[in-house]
Image (cartoon, rainbow, N blue to C red):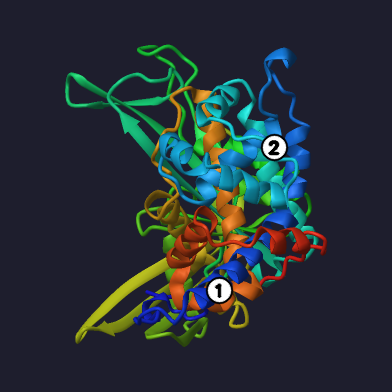
Amino acid sequence: MRNPEALIDWNKLCNRKSEWNTTSEEREARQAAFEVQMNTWRAILPGLLGKFSRIEDPRRPGSIRHKLTVLMVYGLLLFIFQHASRREANRKLSHPSILETLRSIFPEVDSTPHMDTLARLLERIPAEKIEDILGTTVRKLLRSKKLQALLVEKHYIVAIDGTQKFTRIVPFAPEALRRKNGEDTVNYFVYILEVTLVGPQGITIPLLAEFCENHGEEGSQEKQDCELKAFRRLVPRIKELMGRLPLLIVADGLYPNGPVMQICRKNKWDFMIVLRSDCLKTVWEDAEGIHKLEPEQSQAHQWGNRAQEFWWANELKYVWQDTEGRYHTLVLHLVVCNETWEEKGEKHHTTWAWVSGKPITKKNVLDRCNRAARHRWGIEENLLTEKRKGYSYGHAFSYDWNALKGWHALMRLAHLINILTLYSVALWETVKRLGIRGTLWFLRQTFLGNWLDRSRLSRLCNKPAQLRLVI
């Protein structure tokens, strides 16, 4: 179902021939579109280049042919223009015209490296250094109030979800997780816990990632890493990055348990977590009993083409026991949404339920459920975009564990740059006509083809870059 608050209904993109009648018209349109993309680059990349330059270069000074910042820029371009592999990026990004265009915007880019050179560098640079750059870039956007439209009830919605990156039948890295596939076959796979800012408009902003990784030898009795362990490692990273910003954590049915909700309370984070019907049975029993006694704690609403019936129960006590045998009590709140809708002549029904960190009222139920909790799907949409729509999420790029993490961080950073480009005010009409993938393809063709007037680009570089977003 499409979000009624979405900025564009992507099902209604125009189906028509090219709008240009002459090559000069097309050239001007491509120049204007790339200038918007260039403006975003100029607003973001100088700060990134400064951060990249502060990463300690592990190479011998006498053997350095390409500056570290140049290598990182080309790594970003691989993902910005959605090349499927290092080999393809080498073919497409090594033309002299590409270097001339880049130098007209960023004089610091003075050479064209081979992607294998970047791969070897990423094996030696701590991947966390690159990922920290992604987080601090988003934090700067938040502090400059560029993303205030993402606020719901004065909170930023932080979606957390785990996903598998790829799997192999060979032991490519000792850190990879393992699972048996039959009696004789073992699969080795990479699993990542992703953290994303999501907004009620359907916008997603990559934030952090925590790799699940083993440290024991294969066959040892040590338990493997898992998503909940990764979440505990993520907590101090989120706290350090976001500081005192008000956060509302949204997560799936794996997370409604005592330790997770206690962590949220300790860090003063609000939460709306999916609650399955077979989870926290005592909470469900108390909620259903209260609902029978207080049926007025309910509300009907029409959300798009769906009729919604909400009911809720507050101040529910949940007692849980930690690993050391100590008992703890949490006061929780539960909200249920029954939805009905008609599609292709057939009636459908579904039920959603969440455990809430704050009491539910008639005033906040729609915001907390429709504009916050329901946008947990935003992180899933984000992952599907990175997996299936050009970012090669499932491609390894390297089997060295540290380099693999570094490539992943560069991919997420490039995705952020593309998001800011696509939601730029000056490009928004093009995005509405062509769609997201169509616009990115259009920009890629323009950059890689013989379309651009570099003298115009150089003149524009004398003007200050401004990042103006439609959100």
Between 343 and 140, the one nearer to me in the picture:
140
Mark 2 vs mark 1, CA separation in Å: 28 Å
Residue at 78% across / 40% down in the picture? Answer: 50
Q: Which mark is residue 214?
A: none
Residue at 67% across / 71% down in the picture? Answer: 469
Residue 29 sits above or below residue 117 on the image: below
Residue 432 sits above or below residue 229 on the image: below
Q: Is residue 3 visible?
A: no
* The image quarter in which residue 427 lies: bottom right
Q: Quadrant of the C terminus?
A: bottom right
Q: Secondary structure at mark 2?
A: loop
Residue 369 sits above or below residue 89 on the image: below
Residue at 40% across / 39% down in the picture? Answer: 165
Q: What's the amino acid at mark 2?
A: Asp
Q: Is residue 422 visible?
A: yes
Between 288 and 136, the one nearer to me in the picture:
136
Q: Specify which label sits upstream in the sequence, 2 or 1.
A: 1
How busy is the neighbourhood of tag 1: few (under 14 within 10 Å), some, or many (20 plus)? some
Residue 347 locus on image (x, y percent): 23, 83
Q: What's the amino acid at mark 1?
A: Ala
Between 226 and 97, the one nearer to me in the picture:
97
Judging by the rendered image, the residue that carries numbered circle 2 is 110
Judging by the rendered image, the residue that carries numbered circle 1 is 29
Residue 456 sits above or below residue 62 on the image: below
How busy is the neighbourhood of tag 2: few (under 14 within 10 Å), some, or many (20 plus)? some
Residue at 61% across / 30% down in the picture? Answer: 127
Residue 453 locus on image (x, y percent): 63, 62
Labelled pair 2, 1 in contact (Cβ < 8 Å)? no
